[in-house]
Image: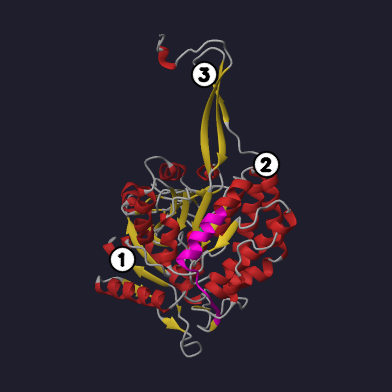
Amino acid sequence: MGGFGFPERQLAQGDLVVRSPINGAEIAQLSTSSRGDVERMIGEAHTAFLAWRTVPAPRRGELVRLFGEELRAHKAALGRLVSIETGKILQEGLGEVQEMIDICDFAVGLSRQLYGLTIASERASHKMMETWRPLGVVGIISAFNFPAAVWAWNAAIALVCGDALVWKPSEKTPLTALACQALLERAAVRHNNAPARLSSIILGGPELGEALVDDRRAPLVSATGSTRMGRAAAPRIAARFGRAILELGGNNGMIVAPSADLDLAARAVLFAAAGTAGQRCTTLRRLFVHESIYDGFLARLKRAYVQIAVGNPLEAGTLVGPLIDKRAFEAMQAALAEARAEAGVIAGGERVHAELWPDAYYARPAIVEMAEQTPLVRRETFAPILYAMRYRDLDEAIARHNAVAQGLASSIFTNDLREAELFTSGEGSDCGIVNVNIGPSGAEIGGAFGGEKETGGGRESGSDAWKAYMRRATTTINYSRDLPLAQGIRFDA
Ligand code: UN1
């Protein structure tokens, strides 16, 4: 098989310098792809698609099963690489690989369940069906913070659906991408039926993502990143009538009600707001605490926050690693300065370990108490800043919760059935993910993942998200000796 789209020259000395956020040190130099490379990869992927779509879906599932085996065998190494390249703690690097394994299992099962429908025809001796067909080349654009799992959600599903892949990972995490690609390539060699170039990788900056976005040979582009990126990509994809799955910014909230189990709530806040150094799209950023429990709960959170071990993510015991780079740190500091100017009360947020690692950017997670939900609070700053606010009545809290442009993940902590039901109802949270007594982050792969409004509306991963990766055909078969027209129309010459 070989030559699966893993150009060797990419590993030579090149113009893309890869650094680990752990200490800021250079860990690799890669060659970026050219626009010509991107065109070629999409063309080759299209050719691979033409062969792949003829392979029966359960056989396509076999490739994903083998890929899952590779992931299991290399979980430790890949998880560590994710940690080294993103700065997330080892447990979370491993968790990311586990998420990949899980979606592979899901996709393997799905490969035997790409069910269509039969529909009652209004005409005698007619059969109507809905079937699902492979779509084509799927362009995947992924972000630095989940450099492997988010690709895998797309890749595992797209592959069983009969599609080919062209992946543009973040230029901050190309090594993880190359490692994933190499494992998929191994699985393809073992599968013995996967066409060459079924998957390839574009290395480089946003302009190469644009080439993918604009290419009509990619009927679907699944893009994860900032709302700014999505705002630029969406109209371009639409202009060529392509399909988009957008997974963009989040500004996720949690309501802590008077009846809440505060032990659980405090632990949930810690993981969701400070974990992954606040760099998940599902990170908790807005906390609404009922005024009757606000002071005690905030004091408790602040005590827990100072205990959080911020440091080398590869060391056991560390809970929070570095921010991805200097720019991320500066954006965090700018947001904190703005909060200060708005009379926000700030705990934490300062840089640490600067003497040890002058080229790395570690920050203590911050809690900022705000009187109101100002424009700053309504904006997503991709850093561990939690804005805490009081509320008096739940309707008002839900209204404020929904009064942001983003709509990804949300949660309520309550033991009051009415409150839980209201929050999860049509009048409740307007997000794609609506949790009760669980924080907003850390979703399982079995559900559809994504959100509303400026989060982009796309759904990936579980449930019936696979349908976006296929073409739906409505087929009517006439087995009569007549030609009845629908809607009772008579058209006899
Ligand atoms: C992301 O941050 O882009 O729900 C994805 C979660 C993870 C995925 C996050 N399962 O936090």
Q: Is residue 190 left or right of residue 416?
A: right
Q: Amino acid at mark 2?
A: Pro
Q: Is residue 150 left or right of residue 429?
A: right
Q: Residue at label 1?
A: 370
- Of residues 164 and 25, the one nearer the viewer is 164
Report the span colored magenta.
27-45
Q: Quadrant of the C terminus?
A: top left
Mark 3–mark 1 distance (CA, rounded to whole Å): 59 Å
Label whose residue precedes the other's in the sequence (3 or 1): 3
Q: Residue at label 2?
A: 56
Of discs 3 and 1, which sits in the foreground? 3
Q: Residue at x 44, y 62 (%)?
A: 209
| Residue 121 marker | 3
- Of residues 414 and 436, the one nearer the viewer is 436
x and y percent of residue 439 in the render? Answer: 49, 57
Query: Which residue is at the far bottom?
Result: 355
x and y percent of residue 463 in the render? Answer: 55, 43
Of discs 2 and 1, which sits in the foreground? 2
Label whose residue precedes the other's in the sequence (2 or 1): 2
x and y percent of residue 12 in the render? Answer: 58, 78
Q: Residue at x 53, y 12 (%)?
A: 124
Crowd around label 3: few <14 · some 14–19 · many ≥20 (10 Å): some
x and y percent of residue 241 in the render? Answer: 39, 45
Whether 146 is drawn above or below 106: the answer is below
Question: Is residue 321 shown in magenta?
Answer: no
Question: Is residue 31 shown in magenta?
Answer: yes
SS at mark 2? loop
Colour approach in the figure: secondary structure
Q: Is residue 109 left or right of residue 25?
A: right
